Amino acid sequence: MVTWPGDPPVRTARVSDMEKGDGATLTRLDMGVHAGTHMDAPLHFLREGKSIDEAPFDALIGPARVIEVEDPEMIRAEALRSAGLFPGERVLLKTLNSSRNWPEQSFDPDFVHMSAEAAAHLAEAGVRTVGVDYLSVGGYRRDGADVHRHLLGAGIWIIEGLHLGGVPSGRYDLICLPIKLAGCEGAPARAVLRRWHDSDG
Ligand SMILES: [Zn+2]
């Protein structure tokens, strides 16, 4: 699978294997914590920030909105402004990244990313959680550090590496549980959306 340039590759290897006569099969996993679908904790860019094991459940589980952003280059503040964000909201931003199977393709330095102004707008709006559909909220060799600091500094929890292909914009229930890695600045996560029906209120 694709990883951010310079990050450790994801590797699995069978330490023991019943196919080779061992009594049980056991796999070793070797990866950076920012591979695949994962979450960033404030500690990723803030020295005194919370680590991923301190992520509150209300950032991980609850109603969420998938917002489609059509801009082929960037998630800009204007697009978010017109979406009308509200405090405490969990927002997943679907871009053109989700129109292709990027996890199995080589790294795309021109993936659709968030501008620092958009990140500042999310911070101002007071959203709880932001999810994006590529490996980072910020662009490659751009102002990615600023984007992260705006979000994490405002107490926003970040989900990266979502794949939202086949997920229409709208309201859902989000369940995104990062592995509880003590003291780590991020962790792989399994993210699931459940569609809201009108009868759900
Ligand atoms: Zn990350």
Image (cartoon, grey):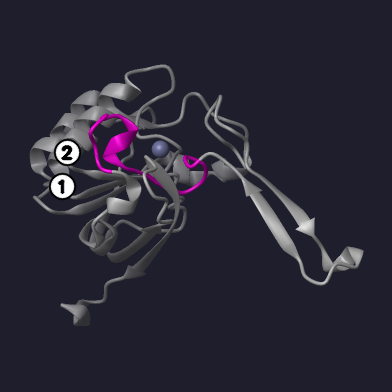
Q: Which of 70 and 63 is in front in this view?
A: 63
Dot 2 amino acid type: Leu
Q: What stretch is highlighted in magenta?
A: 33-50
For the residues labelled 1 and 2, say whether their Cβ atoms are less than 8 Å apart.
Answer: yes
Percent position of residue 38, x then y: 43, 47
Q: Up-down: is 199 above or below 102?
A: below
Label 2 lies in ligand 1 vicinity (Cβ under 8 Å): no
| 153 in magenta | no
Q: Quadrant of the N terminus?
A: top right
Q: Name the residue under label 2.
A: 122
Q: Nearer the viewer, residue 48 or 102?
A: 48
Q: Name the residue under label 1.
A: 127
Residue 80 sits in quarter? top left
Percent position of residue 87, x then y: 9, 50
Q: Residue at x 36, y 31 (%)?
A: 113
Q: Nearer the viewer, residue 84 or 57?
A: 57
- Looking at marks 1 and 2 on the same chain, the residue that comes earlier in the sequence is marked by 2
| Secondary-structure class at tag 2 | helix
Left or right, 16 with respect to 61, comes to right
Q: Which residue is drawn at 25% across and 30% down?
A: 46
Q: Which mark is residue 195?
A: none
